[in-house]
Amino acid sequence: MTALPKNRFKAGLAEGRLQRGVWSTINDTLVAELTASLGYDWMLFDTEHSALDALAVLPLMQAVAPYPVSPIVRPGSLDPAEIKKMLDLGAQSILVPMVNSAEEAALAVAAVTYPPAGIRGVSGLTRATRFASVPGYHKAAREEIALLVQVETAAALDAIEEIAAVPGVDGIFVGPADLAAALGHVGEPSHPEVVAAMLGAVRRIVAAGRPAGVLSLDQAVTVQVIEAGATFVAADVDMAAMKRGLSERL
């Protein structure tokens, strides 16, 4: 028999420890393995804005499994069926995009929770259960699943305290790109008004008792969000880093 794997990322959230991550969008196991070997605390496989889907994410999670990095998966939307598949494939941390209300946050919680408390479909012979080798998996699984919800619209900003109050939300991520668009600055995530909104959101999330996270390729913004209290922070995207490195060499 096999013990239920511990979610180091979720433990870090509970400890309030700063965890640095990287966004992963390239559908290649060698790139994923290389990234996993660099020392990041977490890496997020993004199926919302990339060519990745559940079938593509599976070998990427397998590639990074030997390394001390925590994989997070972002589904394309708040879709319980899609989230269920990601969980069955072994994802223990899920970032749900475009969560705009407490009701939507509650649906996200339900999607990662087995009945009777939630609506996650039950299957036994999955990678998550180590192919039926983890005793008591279905009763204990939620303890090691980290549910992150993403606030990135004006409505979501207005509802931060209500979203944070939903039991089972383990962290709240502030999405800068869509937030910039919502504030009238599409394509300008480092616009002063957008940065001010992000910093305000981070402070409110922390004040509400939840861990806050941000992705920003602007190093100055990264410093500011950490100072504001964000504890899971990404400062790069694999494809952006590759483009930047190759361009500089050219």
Image: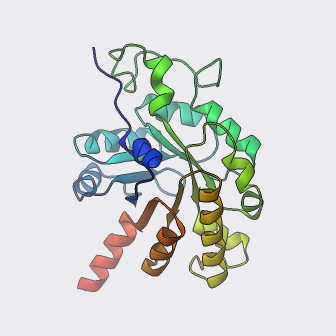
Residue sitting at x 37%, y 52%: 42
Percent across and percent down for residue 137 are 43, 19
Q: From what the image shows, is residue 242 above or below residue 9?
A: below
Q: Is residue 56 above or below residue 221?
A: above
Q: Residue at x 42, y 52 (%)?
A: 44
Instruction: Name the foreground residue: 42 vs 166.
Output: 166
Tell me if residue 217 can be seen. Answer: no
**Colour option used:** rainbow
Question: Is 245 placed above or below 27 here?
Answer: below
Q: Position of residue 38 (x, y in %)?
A: 23, 59
Residue drawn at (44%, 32%), measured in percent from left and top?
144
Pick the quarter of the image with the N terminus.
top left
Is 4 situated left or right of 144 in this image? left
How far across and how far down the image is residue 208, in percent?
65, 53
Number of numbered discs on residues: 0
Return the residue nearer the eye: 250 or 156. 156
In the displayed structure, does residue 111 sit left or right of residue 40? Answer: right
* Residue at horizontal 36 percent and vertical 24 percent from the top: 4
Q: Is residue 103 visible?
A: yes
Give residue 112's quadrant in the image.
top right
- Find residue 102 and report its image quarter: top right
Q: Is residue 149 left or right of residue 61?
A: right
Q: Position of residue 160 (x, y in %)?
A: 71, 56
Q: Choose top left, top right, bottom left or bottom right for residue 173.
A: bottom right
Quarter of the image with the C terminus in it? bottom left
